[in-house]
Amino acid sequence: MDIDVSAGLKMKLDEAQQRAKKFYEAGDSERAAEEYRRCARIMKELVKSAVGAETQKARLEKARQYLELARQIEDGRAVAVTPDERKAHAERRRDAAARKAAGRPADGETETDEDALTAQVAELIVKSPITWDDIGGLSETKREIQAAYALAMATPPQGVKIKSNRNLLFYGPPGTGKTLLAAATSNGLEAAFFNVKVSSLLSKYFGESAKLVTALFGEARRRAPSVVFFDEIESLVPSRSGNMDGPEKRILSTFLSELDGLAGKGAKEFLLTIAATNTPWQLDEAILSRFGKLVYVPLPDDETRARILDLQLDDAGYTYELSGADLVERSAGYSGRDIEKVCTEAIERMLAEANRTVVEAAGRGARALRQQQLVVRPISRADFDAAFRKIRAKTTAQMLRRFDDWAKEAEG
């Protein structure tokens, strides 16, 4: 995407992007996320001087992408690349796949198949700063997870064989923090964390997905202790309900074999596999039977919602007219992701109203804008009222009953 920026701001943006990648590769997720937020602030500054609605919209979208990268890094869900690099990377993958399908080597290809697979697996390894202390509330859920991996990793008494659960399935409504819990588990074990979105695995690497699954588990055993996290595990199911072709069958067969531990029989390395789904009823017995422990991740309780609100508001330096108790009560039934959206909406409304003169200065150019100082005021009740009207809870009572019914059936 071409963006018309001044040389000074373009240089600042490039420098911030490079610092973000450098920090991420060094394992400093906190500073990497901070630099991506800096990129977002630069882009938002450029929005003020945008000429035309389309340019403004494009710059707002780029700012949103930088903020999303920051959030994904903090949640342990990201590979540190810029939005533009992601697009170029996807294009290179598509070109390489097309060349491979046509029987032609990729341009400049010198890697062996094994080298290429190892490089692709490396893209799935993330370093997350999330710990158990960062997840407020959900005490029962956290204890259930901790007990499962603690008993699996501890040394049993001599002569006693204890069957351990090394395959865990997290299920529950969207936006409840299943990825955060997996990241905290990896930190609790001081383990390598492989973050895999199944839908991406199937689409991005389809031609070699089965080989990549084998390489993934092999690398996880090599780096043990390891946590391999598969998000959207239900993405594997549609291929079983329809006509599966050869590659789809190989992917599923390989995945199930690895979950059974057949490829690593006799291995002493500790490998914990966690899968997550928002729709567990889509999983058939072939997949479900591989997971010895089912963990329900519910909507946030009062304690958890209070912690999320603190993170979004108090820790970010904002003040607000409503009491924390009022906000906790009003956000009942909201997921963590929903609450984050409410806070973002209220903050944006406050900033827009408190900085009207900044918008008026947009026509006087970038230099005039850089001389403007943004101001903040307490977030008002009206700001939150508007935010709650716009952002509704996505999880209904009917959906919650369906989770309860499925759990009773699965455990019965």
Image (cartoon, grey):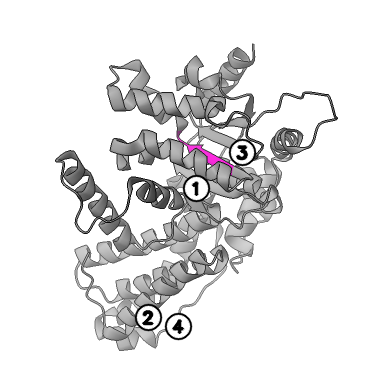
Question: Mark 2 or mark 1: which comes first in sequence?
Answer: 2
Whether label 3 touches label 1, CB < 8 Å: no
Residues 329 and 224: in front is 224
Q: Secondary structure at mark 1?
A: helix
Helix, strand or loop at disc 4? loop
Tell me the kind of residue under disc 4.
Answer: Gln
Q: CA distance from mark 3 to mark 1?
A: 42 Å
Which of the two discs, 2 and 3, labels the residue nearer the N terminus?
2
Name the main secondary structure of what is drawn in magenta.
Answer: strand
Does 104 sit left or right of 358 as displayed? left
Picture residue at 62% right of the left edge, 15% below the top? 408
Residue 175 higher or lower than 373, as above or below: above
Type of amino acid at the residue the image marks with label 1: Phe
Percent across and percent down for residue 84 are 29, 62
Give the alpha-carbon distance from disc 2 to disc 3, as whole Å: 42 Å
Location of the N terminus (image quadrant)? bottom left
Q: Is residue 33 left or right of residue 296?
A: left
User: Which residue is under mark 3?
Assistant: 271
Depth check: give the residue in front, 352 or 12.
12
Label whose residue precedes the other's in the sequence (4 or 2): 2
Which percent across, then down, holds residue 190? 67, 51
Q: Which residue is mark 1?
A: 388
CA distance separating discs 3 and 4: 51 Å
Of pointers 1 and 4, the one earlier in the residue sequence: 4
Q: CA distance from mark 2 to mark 1?
A: 36 Å
- Look at the image and give the residue range highlighted in magenta: 227-232
Mark 2, Cα crowd under 10 Å, few <14 / some 14-19 / many 20+, is some
| Labelled disc at residue 373 | 4
